[in-house]
Amino acid sequence: MTTTLAEMRDGLHVSVSQIKCYLRCPRQYQYRYVLGAEPEFIPANLVLGSAVHEGLAAYYRSVMTTSESPEFAVCMAAFHATLVGFRKGKLPINDGDKIEAQGEALLKVFYETVYQDPPNVVGVEVPFTFELPDPTTGEILEEALVGALDLVVREEEKHVVEEHKTAAKKWSKDQIKNDGQLSAYKLVARKLGLGEVGLRLQVLTKTKKPKMIVENTDRTERDEQDFLATVVGVLRAVDAGVFYPVRTSMCGGCAFQRRCSST
Ligand code: SF4
């Protein structure tokens, strides 16, 4: 029987999103993951990103089954179902008026780019749990890295693992080169028996004229060690109770800003 992502999250675990949250602002990490504080709202970017992600996943799942592109309506149905789920929740969505129009525009750009030549899909949202070795001592940490590979495709002789993002603008070369999610994918793919995979980033930009940007990239052994060292460093800091605020322009969109400014 296949273990689901929810079952994998039963044990002590950490995700790449959690690590990224700590690196952006340790205090936000504390509110979200240590204290379990209720956010004041759900950021529209999060809702849009999640709903578009589901639209893409629905497309690729259909291609995996039929080897053909489904109708665009398949993407939009998954997008709307996710959006409705958020809207039924008790938390308000911050600045959520344009989500439908933005989501449809982004998914349209995606669909028009891929529908004539769908990829050879091997897996969609492939769940993983990965034992984390301390890169210095080799000791296995208590926490496992848990997550899901957005997409695995087969191209000629090898597998390619893709990460899907929505973003305000095109990612910089440094962002692509250093993104921790893709370093994690490389480590995890090897453990899943996919061998030395190619890595790809697909970004849908929320620019006036939305674009789909696809970048192939790779990770060296040093990148993988750096990623593990970052995870270990963050987990040690969390264990030691290091939760300082990082006040930047991101504070305006932080779902804990009222609580944070009153402490
Ligand atoms: S308001 Fe700023 S400093 Fe405070 S938790 Fe949020 S991001 Fe961190």
Image: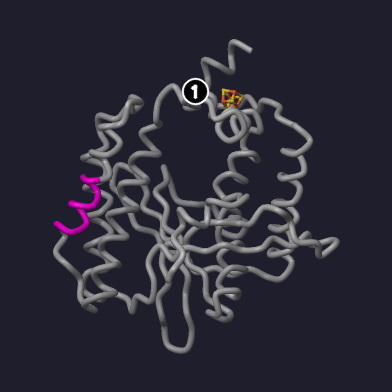
Residue 187, image quadrant: bottom right
Q: Which residue is mark 1?
A: 252
Residue appearing at x 33%, y 24% in the figure: 92
- Placement of the N terminus among the 4 image quadrants: bottom left
Depth order, front residue of 167/26: 26
Which amino acid, mark 1?
Gly
Identity of the residue drawn at 42% across and 88% down: 156
Q: Main secondary structure of the magenta part?
A: helix
CA neighbours of label 1 inside 10 A, class few (<14), some (14 to 19), many (20+): few
Residue 35, x across and y down, in percent: 60, 28
Residue 64 vertical placement versus 214 (above, below): below
Give the image location of residue 213, x and y in percent. Answer: 39, 59
Count of numbered circles on the image = 1
Name the colour scheme: one colour
Q: Is residue 159 above or below residue 263?
A: below
Q: Position of residue 236 (x, y in %)?
A: 77, 44
Q: Is mark 1 within 8 Å of ligand 1?
A: no
Give the image quadrant in which the ligand numbered 1 is located. top right
Task: Return the residue nearer the eye: 103 or 194.
Answer: 194
